Image (cartoon, rainbow, N blue to C red):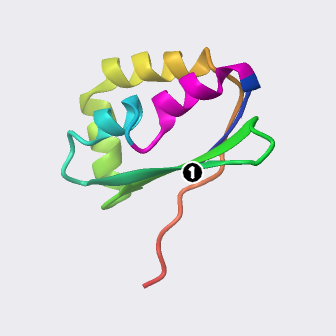
Amino acid sequence: MWSYGIDPDDTSAFERLYGPDGDWARFFARSPAYAGTELLRDPTGDRYLTIDRWADEASHAEFVERHRDEFERLDAAGARLTREETFVGRFEPIV
C-alpha cells in the first residue's frame, strides 16, 4: 500500500497510471499471481492510496525483479506526477 500527494492538475494522468485499469495494473496483470489494484482518492483530490493485491509477497518480488527495466520506467513516470510518495506497508488479509 502506497500513499501519494499530487498536484490537483495531474489528477487525470495520475489516475490513468495508477488506476485499476491503468498502466501499473496492466503491467502487473502479466503475472498470474497479481489479483488487482484498488485506487482510493481523498475527497480533496490531492491525496491517493493504492492497494496492489498479490497472491504472496514472493511472487510480487520475483515479478518486479524479472521486469526491472519496465518497473523503473513506470516508477519514473509516476515520480513526475507526485509531489510525495510514502510506503504505507504490506498487509495480509484476515481469513
What's the magenta region? 9-20
In the orientation shown, which residue stands out farthest toward the right? 44
**Tally of numbered tags:** 1
Residue 37 place in picture, x, y as percent: 43, 50
Which residue is at 30% across, 61% downward?
55
Question: Which amino acid does the dot numbered 1 rest on?
Answer: Met
Please give left or right for residue 53 compared with residue 7 in the image.
Answer: left
Q: Is residue 12 magenta?
A: yes
Q: Is residue 19 magenta?
A: yes
Q: Quadrant of the C terminus?
A: bottom left
Name above or below for residue 4 compared with residue 39. Answer: above
Kindly indicate the quadrant of the structure image that contains residue 2: top right
Kindly indicate the quadrant of the structure image that contains residue 82: top right
Name above or below for residue 57 compared with residue 67. Answer: below
Residue 86 place in picture, x, y as percent: 69, 39
- The residue where tag 1 is placed is 1
Please give left or right for residue 27 compared with residue 6 in the image.
Answer: left
Residue 79 place in picture, x, y as percent: 60, 19
Please give left or right for residue 11 compared with residue 74 in the image.
Answer: right
- Along the line of sight, which residue is nearer the eye, 66 or 40? 40
Residue 33 place in picture, x, y as percent: 24, 54
What type of secondary structure mainly makes up the magenta span? Answer: helix
Count neighbours of disc 1 (C-alpha within 10 A) and say few if under 14, some if 14 to 19, many if 20 or more. Answer: some
Which residue is at 76% across, 35% downward?
46
Name above or below for residue 6 compared with residue 94. Answer: above
Which residue is at 33% across, 24% downward?
68
- Along the line of sight, which residue is nearer the eye, 17 or 28? 17
- Along the line of sight, which residue is nearer the eye, 36 or 60? 36
Which residue is at 48% across, 29% downward?
16
Q: Secondary structure at mark 1?
A: loop
